[in-house]
Amino acid sequence: MFRATKIRLYPTAAQQDLIARQLGCVRFVWNKALDLKKTAWEERRESLSIHTLITMLPVGWAIGHPA
């Protein structure tokens, strides 16, 4: 038997801003990685692994600062 618990969060305005910025950054990186995968497949019929994509990211992205 599975159980679920619903929790409602009430973030402050500063927390809402931080969440919005974090999600925007995640969306940007996801879309960039998806574009790289699609381009590699369409041009070279090459499938890029997650490890390859991680090595392609600029170092600054990993710590939350644009390169």
Image: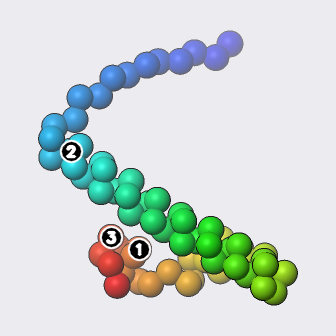
How far across and down, in percent of the image, does residue 7 sit? 37, 22
How far across and down, in percent of the image, does residue 38 sit? 71, 73
Rendered view: 10 above or below 64: above
Determine the secondary structure under disc 1.
helix
Q: Nearer the viewer, residue 13 or 39?
A: 39
Mark 3 Cα shell of 10 Å, populated few (<14), some (14-19), many (≥20): few
Q: How is the image coloured?
A: rainbow
Determine the secondary structure under disc 3.
loop
Measure the alpha-carbon separation of dots 3 and 1.
6 Å
Quarter of the rendering containing residue 36:
bottom right
> Amino acid under label 2?
Gln
Mark 2 Cα shell of 10 Å, populated few (<14), some (14-19), many (≥20): few
Measure the alpha-carbon separation of dots 2 and 1.
21 Å
Mark positioned earlier in the residue sequence (2 or 1) = 2
Rendered view: 55 above or below 31: below
Direction from residue 6 to residue 1 in the image, left or right: right
- Tell me, yes or no, if residue 46 can be seen here: no
Determine the secondary structure under disc 2.
helix
Specify the label residue 15 is tagged with. Answer: 2
How far across and down, in percent of the image, does residue 15 sit? 21, 45
The residue pinned by badge 3 equals 64
Determine the residue positioned at 22% across, 49% down. 17
Direction from residue 39 to residue 23 in the image, left or right: left
Q: Nearer the viewer, residue 13 or 50?
A: 13
Determine the residue positioned at 47% across, 18% down. 5
Specify the label residue 62 is tagged with. Answer: 1
Determine the residue positioned at 56% across, 76% down. 54
> Amino acid under label 1?
Ala
